[in-house]
Amino acid sequence: MRNILIIGSGKSSSHLIQYLLEKSQTEELQITIADKQLEHAKRLIKNHKNATTLALDIFNETLRRQTIKNADIVISMLPAHLHLDIAKDCLSLNKHLVTASYISDQMQALNNEAIQKGLVFMNEIGVDPGIDHMSAMQVIDRIRSKGGKMLLFESFTGGLVAPESDTNLWNYKFTWNPRNVVLAGQGGAAKFIQENTYKYIPYHRLFRRTEFLDVDGFGRFEAYANRDSLKYQSVYGLDQVKTLYRGTIRRVGFSRAWNMFVQLGMTDDSYILEDSEHMSYRDFVNAFLPYSPSDSVELKLRHQLKIDQDDVVWDKLLELDIFNPKKTTGLKQATPAQMLQHILMDSWTLAPDDKDMIVMYHKFGYELAGKSHQIDSTMVTLGQDQTFTAMSKTVGLPVAIAALAILNKQITTPGVLRPISKEVYTPILKTLEQYGIQFHEKEVPYLGYNPLNI
Amino acid sequence: MRNILIIGSGKSSSHLIQYLLEKSQTEELQITIADKQLEHAKRLIKNHKNATTLALDIFNETLRRQTIKNADIVISMLPAHLHLDIAKDCLSLNKHLVTASYISDQMQALNNEAIQKGLVFMNEIGVDPGIDHMSAMQVIDRIRSKGGKMLLFESFTGGLVAPESDTNLWNYKFTWNPRNVVLAGQGGAAKFIQENTYKYIPYHRLFRRTEFLDVDGFGRFEAYANRDSLKYQSVYGLDQVKTLYRGTIRRVGFSRAWNMFVQLGMTDDSYILEDSEHMSYRDFVNAFLPYSPSDSVELKLRHQLKIDQDDVVWDKLLELDIFNPKKTTGLKQATPAQMLQHILMDSWTLAPDDKDMIVMYHKFGYELAGKSHQIDSTMVTLGQDQTFTAMSKTVGLPVAIAALAILNKQITTPGVLRPISKEVYTPILKTLEQYGIQFHEKEVPYLGYNPLNI
């Protein structure tokens, strides 16, 4: 038997655990799930003979090291900032490691030692980052192997509600950490490249500079720019590319409506509102509008944001019950962003039978034999229920497949890695396809942003 | 002879030095001006027998302490963050200290020791902060002494060009640190109180929520909210006030035009533009606009900001020559704010014969014997030339007068102070009047923001 240790068993571990349990007989796996809270894990493994749970406080160094020592490979599903101690244990105890998190500078600093010891520390192998790396590099490598030269790469991902659960005017519910949704795009201007020109969008304009994306069978979406479009430029070998853009997918109309909150200042997380505890939803809105002894909060908001009477964004506000003078959040010492999150959670929390959806869209523009081409590649994954969500599937399956491939020595290159090499993405993408996570490619005319070469 | 040591002799020290020289005979003063660069000071003192200059690097502790030891009182005109070492020397050497800067937490921490030693550490005694404190507290104290109850306090200050030098479409030139002008309002939402309601304005809305101010003989101005309207609420004893607002004065129309830069993202100082060194002014503008192979930068900007063809804000942009494809700033590794500052300095730098102007406007609303009243108090000071500026006069004179009053034991209360007590403001405001810095009061109907008590 080979021992797989999974540390952390939150919402995104359902498919991960299920996949490894399925393979546990044929692959001779013994799975240990270690966490502070084990209810979720216990429900998933249902006394499966190849799985055990272990109550572990990861700050208990002795128990943590002992547990890791007994494993052949470690999967950390903890929040990103908690990986480091585990990674150092893996180094000293000679264990491979898999995480779905961004490679931090501290993690990157372990690269040389991991290489020396022949250990695979695979990171960013969930969804955005993860499946986006693999699916993009597969197409980019194929284009290059034919002699093509990359001109454009755009990549978009969104966590949304499945069409059957898409029941509100915003076409949005929280399928992931609500706080991250409220704060999305903050902390600096979005930066990207269009036709060899660097472009910058300040936060307060971000949600007004969207672009549309059509996905066969799922209709039209929109995307706003991520802050970090250039993050993987060198990693993907795209230093000479003319256009490079990464974005977040929403249903059309979300961004224009969300922009109301941004304009009013409701997404600000940098200061505390006076007496937030007793503020009604209406008081909260009014705090961002000029004082008037007679005009209603509604009219002041319409006037400030120049919202026409028949504009659907108004109905979106009403749907949130945001003008209610009786509802309070009860939050003490709250920032505007915390207040807004509370108000949105009233309306955007998933109902028990709601399902989620992950949408990914890549555009690859390239030149081959003097001609311009473009491939658009899309992927949609739907959740089954609130345990086996699309998010859990797209995060957990690649993690599980990678862990098994490392155990089986299909992936052997050591170091602190992300899944951008053929050795890694080929077997994983192939297995993901068997589980329905499949990209659909089509050739489209290369447009770029200057199709006529003006 | 009494020895006055002035450390720092930048632009704002002209009137300070002139005033003390004038008084040096009758008051038996020996003035020492210590600075790294002494050209400005030497030009001002012209071999006056009661003044000497001293080359001083304030990080040379030995010389600094020796110099302070020889003084009876120390005036620091250095940038605020350099006061602390001097203040500590003053404590250990038993010297009084005067600065025009905001009281930092570190300065405040010296309060007990200053009191124990009977030393006056007078701060915030220039203009905003300074003359605003004194002129406001004089009226507030008078209202209270009659039994009035404060309802409203609003206070506005602006550094502008004098009417005769007001020659551009923006009605603005840099009469003070340009960098502070470009960054004004950043770093958090503006917070104030209107009719017992806390109000918050995010930075990107700040320049669209202005109010008008009319000053007899000088026409109409506008003001946008400072970030710190509540800063002196308790200091002024205004905890029960219904309305509290502090703002910055500009000529009407400045803010609406400035808002274009804010909206585009040009005032951002948090990141570096790619290849800023070789960016033309036009490239700089274009970096904040969507790519287009054919549309002009001008049209894209008009469209993004929805600027009508006949809107004067457009002429304001043209006046700055901001669409010029040949001019570059040459700034390496520049932030957007640094680039914008460079472009503005082309147009907004004072010509040799330009004069500046300081405008201050206070509103005091109060209740007396069941009736509401309001006093509006205004002050305008014009510069004489580019040495004896209005800024130098309104900063330097109160500093000089305070220093002399401390020497003469007219101001004796020890501690880390700002000029808010009668003991301090009465003699200083009286002397300022003799020098033409005079407030004009008029009674106006109390309007507040809810005159009909709806």
Image (cartoon, coloured by chain):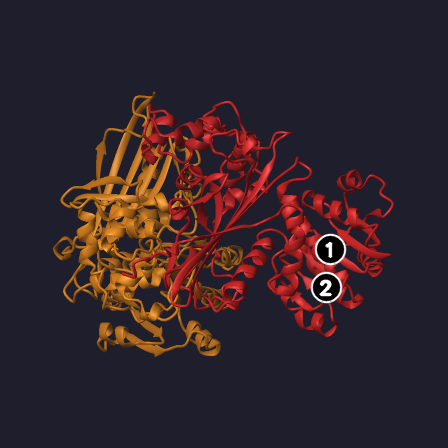
Chain colours: A red, B orange
**Position of residue A10 in the picture relative to residue B372 (left or right):** right
Front tag of 1 and 2: 2
Residue A230 visible (yes or no): yes
Q: Give SS at disc 2.
A: loop
The residue lying at 32 percent from left, 70 percent from top is B278
Query: Of residues B189 and A407, which is closer to you in this image?
Result: A407
Task: Classify A338 as above or below B169.
Answer: above
Q: Are the residues under marks 1 and 2 on the same chain?
A: yes
Q: Which of the two discs, 1 and 2, labels the residue nearer the N terminus?
A: 1
Residue A353 occupies quadrant: top right
The residue lying at 69 percent from left, 60 percent from top is A84
Percent coordinates x, y for residue A143 in the rendering: 50, 64
Q: Residues within 10 Å of mark 2 (few under 14, many from 20)?
A: few
Q: Give SS at disc 1.
A: strand
Residue bearing the label numbered 2: A410
**Position of residue B10 in the picture relative to residue A174 (left or right):** left
Percent coordinates x, y for residue A294 in the rendering: 33, 23
Q: Chain of mark 2?
A: A
Query: Of residues B186 and B225, which is closer to you in this image?
Result: B186
Residue bearing the label numbered 1: A75
Q: Chain of mark 1?
A: A
Residue B414 visible (yes or no): no
The residue lying at 85 percent from left, 40 percent from top is A47
Residue A350 occupies quadrant: top right
Which circle marks residue B288 in the picture? none
Give the Cα distance between marks 1 and 2: 17 Å
Residue A38 occupies quadrant: top right
Percent coordinates x, y for residue B337 in the rendering: 35, 60
Q: Label 2 sits on what residue type? A: Gln
The quadrant of the image that shows the C terminus of chain A is bottom left
Percent coordinates x, y for residue B355 in the rendering: 17, 60
